[in-house]
Image: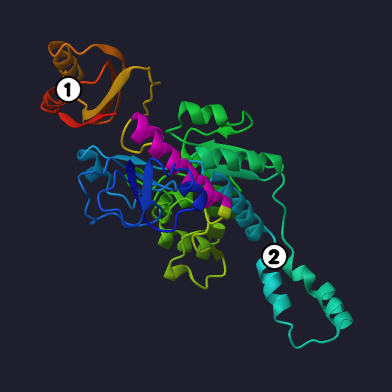
Amino acid sequence: MFKVRTYNQISVKGLERFPRQSYEVGSDIAHPDAFLLRSQKLQGVEVPQSVLAAARAGAGVNNVPIADYSKQGIVVFNTPGANANAVKELVMAGMLLATRGILPGLAYVNSLTHMSDAAEMAALLEKEKSRFAGGEIRGKTLGIVGLGAIGSMVADMALSMGMKVVGFDPALSIDAAWRLSNEVTRMENLQSLLARSDYISLHVPAMDATKHLINDDSLATTKAGAVLLNFARETIVDSAAVLRSLDKGRLRAYVCDFPEPVMLGHAKVIAMPHIGASTEESEENCAVMAANQLMDYLENGNIVNSVNFPAVSMGRTEGTTRITFSNDNVSGVLGHVLGVLADKQVNVVDMVNKSRGDLAFNIIDVQGAPEAHVITAIEAVEHVIRVRVI
């Protein structure tokens, strides 16, 4: 029986994916095979040697010590795209809030508590409504920085609203390129995108390369009067630089999901309490995807949506036993392992080998069930990190 330790409140639909006859799932599992979490910070949390994988029900994994887990052969999963629709819809709400006089109009209406005559109120609002006039997004240009699962959905939404869309993503994958509408104009660099966009929406991951991607220098090239939207991560934006740009009138508004004390009360900032993925549907989608990925790995050794190991999968062949092993991505390791199997007269039926950065992962189906000394010999191969028999 596999054991999964949960952190945070995981959607019931996700937990129901685990068959009760073969999985024990709970928050107090002593020797789990896997972790399933949302926002729990795992830095500093003791990791039992039994742990094979950790799945984050969400896209960001900055709460998981990925480098440490990689050294132990622990596969870390996330759920890209599961919350994409929720974020997409909030981006649209952010654009509309920054374009129309919705928020100040609501505040004004709610300030009229002293009035009791409906006709008098209607006449007053008719007179004052011009104070809250705004614009329309149709015909405007949206620049999307990061064209992955969320960025591509935001692009489709904007196109359906009659906007022009330009995009920039130096790391655009083949899968993402297939998802992207041919109506999106790809820009060669960030500066070109900023210079022609009326709205700029950020959808890149938080990493060293994207820290303060939006700063004084990049904002200096931004089209005057543009609206900046950040529903990605707070570190992508230099908040002090954004505030300077707002005060100078270069940016018209900043809409974000990551409030900071320096932004509170600023007339041109619309700050939300990190609710981009906070929908019932999003939490269910993330939990279900995370559970499915954990089960496929625990039961078959297949890896989908890992942030530290390569994507690798292989169908099962009846009458075989599956051996998986992770290793440092150096030459000769796979050959050495195959040599061990040959020496022990273990017949290989099928296999697949994939690598990603400094790590490699292998699935080998062998005839029959290998004896314990065979697995011990594989574990002894230099640069092998972890071996499993499934």
Q: Is residue 325 above or below residue 220?
A: above
Q: Secondary structure at mark 2?
A: loop
- Badge 1 or badge 2: first in the primary sequence: 2
**Along the line of sight, which residue is nearer the eye, 102 or 217?**
102
Instruction: Please check the rendered image and state whether residue 292 is part of the magenta-colored stretch, yes or no.
Output: yes
- Please give left or right for residue 297 compared with residue 377 in the image: right
Q: Position of residue 257 (x, y in %)?
A: 50, 59
Percent position of residue 53, x then y: 31, 41
Query: Residue at the location (34% across, 43% down)?
Result: 209
- Specify the principal SS of the magenta part: helix
**x 55%, y 26%: residue:** 178
**Quadrant position of the N terminus in the picture:** top left
Separation of residues labelled 1 and 2 (CA atoms): 72 Å
In the rendered image of this protein, does residue 175 appear above or below residue 65? Answer: above
Residue 101 badge = 2
Q: Quadrant of the C terminus?
A: top left
Q: Amino acid at mark 2?
A: Gly
Q: Residue lying furthest front in this view?
A: 21
- SS assignment at label 1: loop
Name the residue type under label 1.
Glu
Determine if the magenta segment contains residue 380: no
Instruction: Tell me which segment is drawn in magenta.
Output: 281-304
Residue at 86 percent of width and 81 percent of height? 118
**In the drawing, what numbered circle is on residue 371?**
1
